[in-house]
C-alpha cells in the first residue's frame, strides 16, 4: 500500500460512516467530545463511552451497601467502567477523600469499631485510622520504558476491574480504607465482604466514602460492600465472573479458600512472628520494643510479636527490663493458669490447641483478672517464662501475653524462631548488634518483613523506613501491598520509530 491508496481507503470508510468526505490527512485526530453522534462510539480519555453499562441493568444500593453479591458486583462494575473514562486526578481525589475522612473521624470511627468488635484498644483503634494517610496512592503509579534501535516500548500499569476483597475483624475499617486507597489509585473498583463482627463499621465507612466521592467527582459505587456478610457471600465473590481478582486479609481458613479460588488472589495470611534477643542486644530498647509491638491493639496485629527467644546470657536482664516498659511478669503458676484458660487441648493428637476466642484482643488487666491478678494501672502486656511446649509459643494468640523462652545461644534462638514461625513467611524480629546473627536469621527465616532493633510496626513504615498497608501478602508473595499490587502490566510497542535521540 502506498500513501494514496491509504488515503483512498480512509476516505471511503469515513464517507460510509457518514463523517463526510473531508480531504484532511488521515492522521488528523478526531475531536474528543462527549455524546455519540451518528451512533459512533465516542472516545473520552481513550475509553468507549458506551462501556459504562452493566449486563445486570440498573442496580441500587444504599451508598454502596448491598444485600446481594450480584448487585454489589454489578454496581462496582458499572462504576469501574465510568472510572476508566476519568483522569487519574479523579482517582487522586478519591484517595484524598478516604485519607482525610479517616483522619477527621478517627476518634468516632475508632470508638465505633471497638464497640462493635469488642477487641483491641481504643487509643490504637484511633491511631490505626489516623495513619491511613501514610498508605500510598496515585503517586505510586509509574510507566517503564525501553528505548533502543528497534524503537520505543512503554509498559504501563493498568487496572484489573472489580476486585473482591475480604477484611479481618482485627482491623475492619483500617484494612478496608487502605485497600480502597491502593485499589482505586490503581483504577479499580472493589466489592468487600467484611468480617461479620466488624461489618457495621465497615459499611458506615463505605457509605461515608461513597457520599463524599459522589459529591467530589460524581461517581457512585466505586466501593461496594455486602451489608450482611457470610461465608456464602464470600464464596459468591470468589466465584463471580465479573470479579477479576481477589485480595484476602485474614487467618488460615480464608487464606486457604482464596488460594483454591480459580482467579488471581493476593493473600494476606496469618503469621506467628518470633523475636530473637541475643547477648549483644540493647536490652532496654529490646524490652521497650517488644512491649510496644506485642501490646499494640492488644496484640491483634498479624505482624505483632507473638513469642520471644532470648539467649541465656541476657535472659534475666531482659525479663527485668520488660517490667520497666509497661510489662507485668507472671510467675510459673500464673502462666499455667492463663494458658489453661486461653487454650483447650487439640482435638486430635498433633493438632492445634483450640484458642479461646473470648480472650482475643482483651486488655492485659482483664486477662490478669481472669487468673486473680491485679496489675498496676498502665500495664500494657503480660509476659512470663515458658518452654516451647506451652501453646502460647506455637499458636497465634492475638492477646497481650507473650511467652519468653530461654535459649542456649543465638544459634538455638534463631533455629527456634524458624521452627515456630511455621514457614508462614510473614514477619520475624531480632534485637542484636551482631550483623552475622542478623544475616543468618534473615536468610533462614525468609520472611516478608524482617525487623531489626525495633517494634514490629517499624516494618510497616511506623518508625522504620517504608510505607504502610494493613494487607501484607505473604503466601502469594506481593509483600506489603501498594497500588501496583492491583495492576496489570501492559506493553505498548512502536517498532523502529519514536526513539528521538
Ligand atoms: P478470620 O480468618 O477469622 O476472618 C477473616 C475474613 O475471612 C473474615 O471476613 C471472615 O468472615 C472470612 N472467612 C473466614 N473463613 C472463610 C472461608 N473459609 N471462606 C471465605 N471467607 C472466610 O481472621 P480474623 O480473626 O478476622 O483476623 C485475624 C487473622 O488474620 C490472623 O490470622 C491474622 O494474622 C490475619 N491477618 C493477616 C494480615 C496480613 O496482612 N497478612 C492482616 C490482618 C490479619
Image (spheres, grey):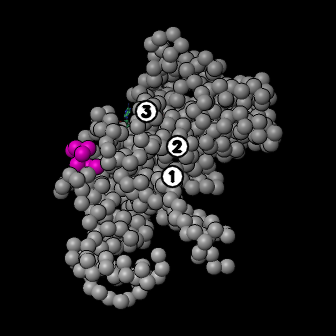
Q: Which residue is mark 3?
A: 260
Label 3, label 2: how far apart the Cα atoms are? 16 Å
Q: Which residues are magenta?
A: 63-73
In what quadrant of the picture does the C terminus appear? Answer: bottom right
Question: Can I make out residue 473 in this image?
Answer: yes
| Mark with earlier residue (3, 1) | 3
Q: Is residue 205 left or right of residue 487?
A: left
Q: Residue at x 23, y 80 (%)?
A: 18
Q: Residue at x 51, y 52 (%)?
A: 485
Q: Residue at point 22% right, 72% down?
A: 39
Q: Inspect this view and state whether residue 362 appears.
A: no
- Residue with the mark numbered 1: 485
Count of numbered labels shown in the rendering: 3
* Mark 1 vs mark 2, CA separation in Å: 10 Å
Q: Give the mark nearer the N terminus: 1 vs 2.
A: 2
Residue 473: mark:
2
Amino acid at each position: 500500500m502506498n500513501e494514496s491508496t491509504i488515503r483512498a481507503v480512509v476516505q471511503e470508510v469515513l464517507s460510509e460512516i457518514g463523517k463526510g468526505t473531508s480531504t484532511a490527512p488521515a492522521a488528523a485526530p478526531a475531536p474528543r467530545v462527549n455524546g455519540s453522534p451518528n451512533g459512533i462510539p465516542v472516545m473520552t480519555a481513550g475509553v468507549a463511552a458506551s462501556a459504562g453499562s452493566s449486563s445486570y441493568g440498573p442496580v441500587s444500593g444504599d451508598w454502596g451497601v448491598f444485600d446481594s453479591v450480584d448487585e454489589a458486583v454489578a454496581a462496582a462494575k458499572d462504576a469501574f467502567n465510568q472510572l476508566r473514562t476519568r483522569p487519574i486526578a479523579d482517582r487522586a481525589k478519591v484517595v484524598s477523600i478516604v485519607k482525610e475522612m479517616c483522619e477527621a473521624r478517627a476518634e468516632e470511627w475508632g470508638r465505633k469499631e471497638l464497640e462493635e468488635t469488642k477487641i483491641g484498644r481504643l487509643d490504637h483503634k484511633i491511631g490505626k485510622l489516623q495513619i491511613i494517610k501514610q498508605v500510598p496512592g496515585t503517586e505510586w503509579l509509574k510507566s517503564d520504558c525501553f528505548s533502543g534501535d528497534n524503537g520505543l516500548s512503554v509498559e504501563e500499569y493498568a487496572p484489573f476491574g472489580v476486585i473482591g476483597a475480604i477484611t479481618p475483624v482485627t482491623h475492619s475499617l483500617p484494612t478496608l480504607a487502605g485497600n480502597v486507597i491502593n485499589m482505586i489509585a490503581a483504577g479499580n473498583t472493589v466489592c468487600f465482604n467484611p468480617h461479620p463482627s466488624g461489618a457495621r463499621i465497615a459499611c458506615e465507612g463505605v457509605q461515608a466514602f461513597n457520599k463524599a466521592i459522589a459529591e467530589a467527582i460524581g461517581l457512585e459505587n466505586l466501593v461496594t460492600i455486602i451489608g450482611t456478610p457470610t461465608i456464602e457471600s464470600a464464596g459468591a465473590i470468589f466465584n463471580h465472573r465479573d470479579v477479576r481478582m481477589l485480595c484476602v486479609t485474614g487467618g488460615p481458613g480464608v487464606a486457604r479458600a482464596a488460594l483454591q479460588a480459580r482467579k488471581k488472589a493476593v493473600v494476606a495470611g496469618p503469621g506467628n512472628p518470633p523475636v530473637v534477643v541475643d547477648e549483644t542486644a540493647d536490652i532496654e530498647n529490646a524490652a521497650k520494643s517488644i512491649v510496644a509491638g506485642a501490646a499494640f491493639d492488644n496484640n491483634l496485629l498479624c505482624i505483632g510479636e507473638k513469642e520471644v527467644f532470648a539467649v541465656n546470657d541476657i535472659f534475666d536482664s531482659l525479663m527485668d527490663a520488660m517490667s520497666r516498659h509497661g510489662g507485668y511478669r507472671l510467675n510459673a503458676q500464673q502462666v499455667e493458669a492463663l494458658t489453661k484458660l486461653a487454650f483447650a487441648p487439640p482435638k486430635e493428637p498433633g493438632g492445634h490447641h483450640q484458642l479461646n476466642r473470648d480472650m482475643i484482643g482483651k486488655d492485659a488487666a482483664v486477662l490478669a483478672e481472669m487468673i486473680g491478678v491485679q496489675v498496676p494501672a498502665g500495664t500494657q502486656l503480660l509476659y512470663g517464662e515458658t518452654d516451647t511446649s506451652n501453646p502460647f509459643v506455637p499458636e497465634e494468640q492475638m492477646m497481650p501475653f507473650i511467652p519468653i523462652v530461654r535459649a542456649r545461644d543465638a544459634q538455638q534462638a534463631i533455629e527456634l524462631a524458624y521452627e515456630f514461625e511455621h514457614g508462614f513467611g510473614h514477619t520475624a524480629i531480632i534485637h542484636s548488634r551482631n550483623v552475622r546473627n542478623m544475616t543468618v536469621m534473615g536468610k533462614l527465616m525468609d520472611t516478608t518483613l524482617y525487623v531489626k532493633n525495633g517494634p514490629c510496626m517499624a516494618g510497616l513504615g511506623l518508625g522504620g523506613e517504608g510505607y504502610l498497608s494493613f494487607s501484607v501478602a505473604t503466601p502469594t508473595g506481593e509483600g506489603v501491598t501498594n497500588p501496583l499490587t492491583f495492576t496489570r502490566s501492559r506493553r505498548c510497542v512502536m517498532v523502529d520509530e519514536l526513539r528521538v535521540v
